[in-house]
Amino acid sequence: MSFASLCPGNTLRPRFPALASIGLFILLVHVVFVHQGAAAEKGPSKSSLTLEEAIRTALDKNPRISASLFQVDASAAKITQARSGLYPRIDFSETFMRTNNPALAFSTRLNQEQITMQDFDPARLNDPSTIDNFASVLSLSIPIYDAGQIRIGVDQARLGHESASLSADRVRQEVITSVIAAYIGVLLAQDQMEVIRQSIESAKANRNIIQARVKTGLAVKSDLLRAEVRISELEQERLNARSLVEVSMASLNAAMGISLDEVLHPAPFEQKGLKPPDELEKWIQEALRNRPDLREMRLREITAEQEVKKAKMAHLPGLFFTSNYEIDSEEYDRTANNYTVGVVLRANLFSGLGLQAKVREAVATLHQVKAALKQMELFIGVETRRAYFQAMSSFERIQVAEAAVSQAEEGLRIVRNRYESGLFTIVNLLDAELALQQARTLHLRSLYDHKLALAQLNLAAGKTEEGIR
């Protein structure tokens, strides 16, 4: 019996498509699982990035934030250093000495408790034999009174730590503002790309109209050529705008402290509910009250005043308790020990006018800080006023720009209709098209300028975190 008789043609042929379908299904399942596994290794795909997420990333990864926090840690360590002067100081030293100096040799044998009557022989006193000595000394020193210099140093270190914290707060505000500015730059560049895309579509629609009129003899070919040139110009603008998007994205990544090659998708702002800032005087008062760098400068003034006090206190005497415990041995087979306990009164009588010069230096530094503080207050007033009027100006420009867009759109519609009717020239059509593109661009800039101006105003007032909500 043949194989063909066992498997007739009407039953054999349908099985091969079924087997092929099953094999294809298995292959597809395999590909899907492999693709999912690869995707799992690469991590989830990037979703849209909100401004709040960008700011949180910057606060976690921006190098300026890290550097400022390390500065805070360093200032905290200085407090411990200054406070250590209030505690006892304990030192240990191990000294080896080999000598035949008559005075040292005699005193060494005396410390080792090896003096005999033969050591008083003049010949032995004048020409002693060489002697070795291992001296182990444990010393203790405790400040009893230093006219308050150590206490002032501790207070200065605490002020320095607070100043470093305020400096870190200001860095935090500046980083947040830089992220906002970079974020706005990306959105503006992307929206400008969209404006150019709309202009290209409008230009192509105009070209189609001109092309139809050329075919019917109602327009000359030069009109069509000018329309093509206009499209080419817009294509070049689109390429430049794409480059600006890439650069703006790199700036945002740098502000966030992440890789410049990472691709992000910033989410657009909510453009509703825009309103002008409050009264100028309120912003100035908040700036003078909240600015971390101004508060830091005021702490520097206090620190400089304390430095003057500390420099003057250096003229006063200091009282210290000291003690030593010493073990002397020639070969550690036999040791002798002794101790010394005492109180030291130390007062400077003359140091080449160094202390007086230090006082003058501290006084001059204090006056310098006071002048810098006054200058900073004036600068903050100017900076706040500039940011305030920029915010007001940008808000007012939004209203004007919105009306200009509506007028330009209506103007292009009228010019296009009249061009089709033969009442206007190609120049009028291209001018109307360009006017609409410029109006849309100015409208975008006014919107984002207002966002950026508000961010700068909040930075000037020292309340950046409130300004991003």
Image (spheres, rainbow, N blue to C red):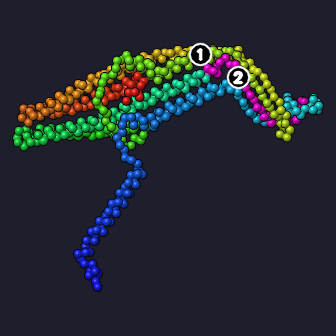
Q: How far across and how far down the image is residue 75, in percent?
A: 56, 28
Residue 58 magenta-drawn?
no
As drawn, the label of residue 143 is: 2
Q: How many residues crowd around disc 1 within 10 Å: few (fewer than 14), some, or many (20 or more)?
A: some
Mark in front: 2 vs 1 = 2
Number of numbered discs overlaid on the protein picture: 2
Q: Earlier in the sequence, mark 2 or mark 1?
A: 2
Q: Quadrant of the N terminus?
A: bottom left
Q: Disc 1 marks which amino acid?
A: Val
Q: Which mark is residue 183?
A: none
Spot occupied by residue 428 in the image (x, y as percentages of width and height): 13, 31
Q: What residue range appears in magenta?
A: 124-153
Q: Which residue is mark 1?
A: 308
- At x 50% / y 33%, what residue is drawn? 67
- Viewer can see residue 1: yes
Above or below, 421 relative to 36: above
Looking at this view, is 22 or 311 the one in front?
22
In front: 424, or 68?
Answer: 68
Percent x, y for residue 444?
Answer: 27, 31
Q: Is residue 50 left or right of residue 412?
A: right
Spatial separation of the CA atoms under disc 2 and disc 1 = 22 Å
Which residue sits at x=37%, y=30%? 469
Q: Is residue 145 magenta?
A: yes
Camera-nearest residue between 248 and 163: 163
Determine the secondary structure under disc 2: strand
Write down the quadrant of residue 10 in the picture.
bottom left
Q: Amino acid at mark 2?
A: Pro
Neighbour class for label 2 at 10 Å: few (<14), some, many (≥20)? Answer: some
Q: Residue sitting at 47 percent across and 35 percent down?
A: 63
